[in-house]
Amino acid sequence: MPSDNAAPPLDVDRILADPGVRIVVCCGAGGVGKTTTAAALALRAAELHGRRTVVLTIDPARRLAQSLGLTELDNTPRQVKGIDVEDSGGELHAMMLDMKRTFDDVVLAHTDPAKAAEIFANPFYQAMSSTFAGTQEYMAMEKLGQLHARGEWDLIVVDTPPSRSALDFLDAPARLSRFLDGRMLRLLLAPARTGGRSMFSLVTASFGMFSRVVQKVIGTQLLTDLSGFVAALDSMFGGFRQRAEQTYRILQARETAFLLVAAPEPDAVREAAYFAGRLRAEQMPLAGLVLNRVHQPTVAELGAAESRAAADRLATAGGHESAVEVLRAHAALVEQAVREQQVAARFIDAFPQVPTVSVTAQPADVHDVDGLRTIAAAIGRP
């Protein structure tokens, strides 16, 4: 049976209208409508609340661009035209994280042109900036920090990857610090600080067996590329860590609101609960849960058993076939709604103080601005 506990209602419009809230982070499992939710919230903030808003997606899927009527998104905010902001005075911009472009921009901003060219030519940098695990999440932190520092947005809405990856998003500063402080990094940096002595002569003289083992495991050329990459970036590492930790503190501040997005399915609710626990442990501001794609019968007074019994009676009496189908479909919908309430209750029982809003399942996927408005209106009315 559904839980007897009722979660407090989530007033999303209060969050979107609050000038003290400058960042909204949408997070959750994959396939629960998180990207659509982020776009809908950003649209509502611009149209209804007159805020100059940018929505940043870290998900490489193209759904956000399509729903906003844009042919493509890239690492630069693009203004969304044709929305209803004449009365509110708001603006809506959208962008998609390009992790390599963001990494390149960081290098250009914090090194001289000659050093930047050296870094860009390094094979290890080329691989790391494009494909290495964790780079996307760290560069998402960089991009969020850049957008925040520019001060030109009233509200930044962030659409994260599925929640375990979004946890990597939160973990990026700590993982970077562990990397920078690691013994391997200090060993690799040592040759660059010896006035030009060969890496291998230094390492062989100093570490002997360590050098031979490392060369055997990862190869001489890769070790050379890695050493050159680390040496070239040595002067930047402090800045990387400082900016990441600053963005992390922003995510803990009152100007940020985390919204969990889930569907009433066991895996999605389990992920939401996992993330909620993590946010609480990290002292990050969890504003509420958006429960997407909830099914609600139009005639709530008619239960599943009564509807099915009526259908059986009609069928036995040779009643109208369409009426029998409607009654049986209603019974199935009521049963589905009960199952969804039971699943949602697992989150509510674990986090009874987290405000929640339910969004009724739509008859079709959202592909345009009108569809986003429908979702936004459903989320914005507690």
Image: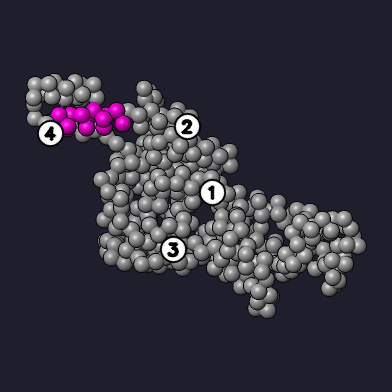
Q: Quadrant of residue 319?
A: top left
Residue 335 among those drawn in magenta? yes
Q: Residues within 10 Å of mark 1 (few under 14, many from 20)?
A: some
Magenta residues span: 323-337
Label drawn at residue 231 = none
Q: Which residue is mark 2?
A: 351
| Separation (CA) of disc 4 from disc 1 | 47 Å
Amino acid marked by disc 2: Phe
| Separation (CA) of disc 2 from disc 1 | 22 Å
Q: Given this view, does label 1 or label 3 mark the residue nearer the observer?
A: 1
Q: Given this view, does label 2 or label 1 mark the residue nearer the observer?
A: 1
Q: Residue at x 42, y 65 (%)?
A: 73
Return the disc, 1 or 3, that comes first in the chain's sequence: 3
Label drawn at residue 322 = 4
Amino acid marked by disc 4: Ser
| Separation (CA) of disc 2 from disc 3 | 33 Å
Label drawn at residue 165 = 1
| Mark 4 residue element | helix
Q: Quadrant of the N terminus?
A: top left
Q: Is residue 268 above or below residue 348?
A: below
Return the disc, 3 or 4, that comes first in the chain's sequence: 3
| Separation (CA) of disc 1 from disc 3 | 19 Å
Q: Residues within 10 Å of mark 3 (few under 14, many from 20)?
A: many
Amino acid marked by disc 1: Ser
| Mark 2 residue element | loop
| Mark 3 residue element | strand
Q: Given this view, does label 3 or label 4 mark the residue nearer the observer?
A: 4
Return the disc, 4 or 1, that comes first in the chain's sequence: 1
* Residue 44 rendering spot, x and y as whole percentages: 33, 54
* Residue 263 rendering spot, x and y as whole percentages: 39, 40
| Mark 1 residue element | helix
Q: Which residue is mark 3?
A: 95
